[in-house]
Image (spheres, rainbow, N blue to C red):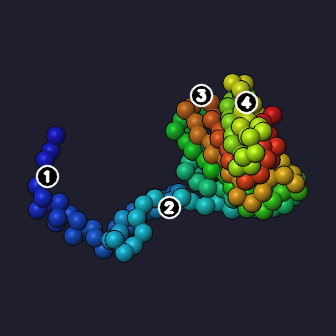
Amino acid sequence: MTSVNANTLYNIHNAVANSIRVKGASSRGDLVISNSAGVCGLRKKVIDLTTTYTVLAADSGSLYTLGTAGGFTVTLPAVAACAGCEFDFVVKVAPTTAYTIHSAASDVHGMGLSSDLDGAGNVDSTQGTAVDDLAFVANEAKIGDRLHIFSDGTFFYAAFLTSGVLTAVTFT
């Protein structure tokens, strides 16, 4: 283990205090370090979707906005290629036709919560059975409803949160 004294830390702090920006070649996101007056942290890449799309494992960490009332299908990459990958989806335009998040194999396990906390059925899940599709349901999903998917390379695990009723998202 290497030890660093306080003077060294002070000098490093002064060298980076006015900002450093590291941008990946794939433009997946920026790691921004700046002084106390600025933004710090990781910014997600935002991908605005308005039509059918196939997600790339290289886009792990991205936030996908779903923005066409007519709905469409988003296909996940092969789960084996996604160990450690994470994807977020958020409804930008309430759908009149479902937004479907599709996996080519029955490898998605999921659960979700509703903010409609009336005490009647506010949690839903696949109950241990893997599925192919998750859908933001037409005329029920609302702007801001959200789905987070991550993978261990064997399965995708999905968690959703809706601003309304649980029937706004389905597992099939």
Residue at 37%, 75% in the rendered image: 37
Q: Quadrant of the C terminus?
A: top right
Q: Mark on residue 43? A: 2
Q: CA distance from mark 3 to mark 4?
A: 16 Å
**Badge 3 local density, few (<14 within 10 Å), some, or many (20+)?**
some
Q: Are marks 4 and 1 in contact (CB under 8 Å)?
A: no
Q: Nearer the viewer, residue 159 or 43?
A: 159
Q: Quadrant of residue 5?
A: bottom left
Is residue 49 visible to us here? Answer: no
Q: CA distance from mark 2 to mark 1?
A: 29 Å
Q: Is residue 76 left or right of residue 10?
A: right
- Mark toward the viewer: 1 or 3: 1
- The residue mark sitting in front, 4 or 2, is 4
The residue to which callout 1 is attached is: 4
Is 121 displayed left or right of 5 in the figure? right
Residue topped by disc 4? 126
Residue 71 versus residue 159 in the image, above or below = below
Separation of disc 4 and disc 1 at Cα? 50 Å
- The amino acid type, in three-letter code, at marker 2 is Arg
Where residue 104 sits, quadrant-wise, is top right
Q: CA distance from mark 1 to mark 3?
A: 41 Å
Name the residue furthest top.
Answer: 128
Q: Is residue 62 above or below residue 37?
A: above
Q: Earlier in the sequence, mark 2 or mark 1?
A: 1
Q: In the structure shown, which secondary structural element does the residue marked by tag 2 occupy?
A: strand
* Disc on the earlier residue, 3 or 4: 4
Q: Which mark is residue 154?
A: 3
